[in-house]
Amino acid sequence: MMWNTGMAWGPWMWLVMGGGTVAFWAAVVLAVRWAFGGQSGRLASGREGRVVESARTPLPAEGPSRTPGPLEVLQDRLARGEIDVDEYTRTRTALIESDPMLGRDRTDAAPR
């Protein structure tokens, strides 16, 4: 009987087997990370030694983000010094005249 088919285990075959093994375990790690959402081990220590969450998940205190209203933008521009008080007053008056709901107090707008 002839057992040798002419294919010898050369160095290239060891490289193929090693690459296949690495690819297999990489696929297993990626599947586990995908299955668990990639959230395990996402805590990092801050400079002061306190634990902070990753940037991937929003902090509970942040809440949903909202866009600032036109009066808030106007107040920010005044605070940064981009506009003066006269321009602030004129623009605020024009905004409130165009939409009277902007001039209402936030506590009045809340449902009771």
Image (cartoon, grey):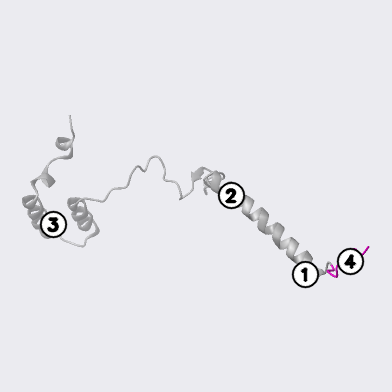
The overriding secondary structure of the stretch rendered in magenta is: loop
Label drawn at residue 31: 2
Q: What label does residue 12 carry, if any?
A: 1
Q: Amino acid at mark 1?
A: Trp
Name of the residue lying farthest toward the top:
112
Q: Which comes sooner in the sequence, label 2 or label 4?
A: 4
Whichever of callouts 1 and 4 sits on the residue coming sooner in the sequence is 4
Residue for badge 3: 88
| Left or right: 26 in relation to 84 | right
Q: Residue at x 40, y 40 (%)?
A: 60
N-term-proximal mark, 3 vs 4: 4
Location of mark 4 (residue): 4
Regarding mark 4 in the picture, which secondary structure is present there?
loop
Viewer-side residue, 2 vs 43:
2
Disc 3 residue crowd, few under 14, some 14–19, many 20+, Cα 10 Å: some
Q: Position of residue 19 (x, y in %)?
A: 71, 62
